[in-house]
Image (cartoon, coloured by chain):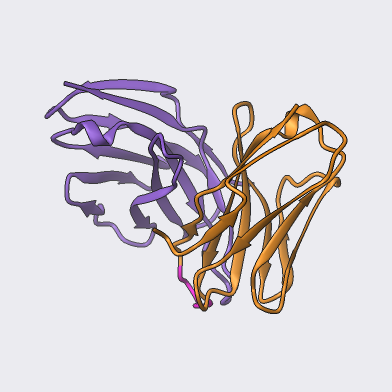
Chain colours: A orange, B purple
């Protein structure tokens, strides 16, 4: 158990809908990263938040957005869903420490868009 | 931009044998970190081993070791005495050094599916 929690575990929805994925980082970790794992794109970085502020964006679609709240949990919002958005979405957290390099991954949320 | 390439989509090995998974990367950075992650059928991402680019000595963790060739930008993973529980997808990943406390994202290769049979 990495200490990172993600809810829900599974989500099934229809095209055009909007969903919210939730991530709670390890206690004390200020950084949260979101990654998407799909069959065609592999594992790719979406977005990084540090202590409530967006720090970096990867291959995140405009239909997707995220935020990190004062209690440090983060939410990834996916809207106008398409079949191709079906994937496993991971969040990972790290402590706030210079040159610290290990990321702790949550169990992931499997999104199925029908 | 950094890229990570794993050229072996699938590999198989018998129990107790040794297997090597390949990874190459491209970067203009002189300092960075490299990782191997394991993803078993449960889908949990598990850190197997890490290597700091400034360290010449290859990292080892029990049955897992790496062959880090900085000039060739190669980072292979050797699994000795393979066990059934090693069956998983293995991802090679790159990380730029952290300029501050916030950290930086991982860049992953496409993965290698390893099957260990008895």
Q: Is residue B65 left or right of residue A47?
A: left
Per the image, is A97 magenta? yes
Q: Tell which of B48 and A81 is nearer to you.
A: A81
Quarter of the view holding residue B38: top left
Horizontal and vertical percent for residue B72? 39, 40
For the stretch drawn in magenta, what is the main secondary structure?
Answer: loop
Is residue A11 shown above or below A105? above
Would residue B71 be seen by someone viewing this image from the given angle? no
Horizontal and vertical percent for residue A58? 70, 50
What residue sits 83% from the left and 45% below the top?
A: A18
The region drawn magenta spans: A96-100
Q: Is residue A16 left or right of residue A36?
A: right
Horizontal and vertical percent for residue A60? 75, 47
Quarter of the view holding residue B74: top left
Is residue B111 shown above or below A48? above
Per the image, is B91 magenta? no
Horizontal and vertical percent for residue B106? 54, 52
Locate the C terminus of chain B and report the quarter of the image it occupies.
top left
Q: Tell which of A41 and B8 is nearer to you.
A: A41
What residue sits 51% from the left and 37% below the top?
A: B109
What residue sits 25% from the left and 36% below the top?
A: B85
């Amino acid at each position: 158990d990495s200490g990172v929690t993600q809810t829900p575990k599974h989500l099934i929805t229809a095209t055009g809908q909007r969903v919210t994925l939730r991530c709670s980082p390890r206690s004390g970790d200020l950084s949260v990263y979101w990654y998407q794992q799909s069959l065609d794109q592999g594992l790719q970085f979406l977005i990084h938040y540090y202590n409530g502020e967006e720090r970096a964006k990867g291959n995140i679609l405009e239909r997707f957005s995220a935020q990190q709240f004062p209690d440090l949990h983060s939410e990834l919002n996916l809207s106008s869903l398409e079949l191709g958005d079906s994937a496993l979405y991971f969040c990972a957290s790290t402590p706030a420490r210079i040159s610290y390099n290990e990321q702790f991954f949550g169990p992931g949320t499997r999104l199925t868009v029908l | 931009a950094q890229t990570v390439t794993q050229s072996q989509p699938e590999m198989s090995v018998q129990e107790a044998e040794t297997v090597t998974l390949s990874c190459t990367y491209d970067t203009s950075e002189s300092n960075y970190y490299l990782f191997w992650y394991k993803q078993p059928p449960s889908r949990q991402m598990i850190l197997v081993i890490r290597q700091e680019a400034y360290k010449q000595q290859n990292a080892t963790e029990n049955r897992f070791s790496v062959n880090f060739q900085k000039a060739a930008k190669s980072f292979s993973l050797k699994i000795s005495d393979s066990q059934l529980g090693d069956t998983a997808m293995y991802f090679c990943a790159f990380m730029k050094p952290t300029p501050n406390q916030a950290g930086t994202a991982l860049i992953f290769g496409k993965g290698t599916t390893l099957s260990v049979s008895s």
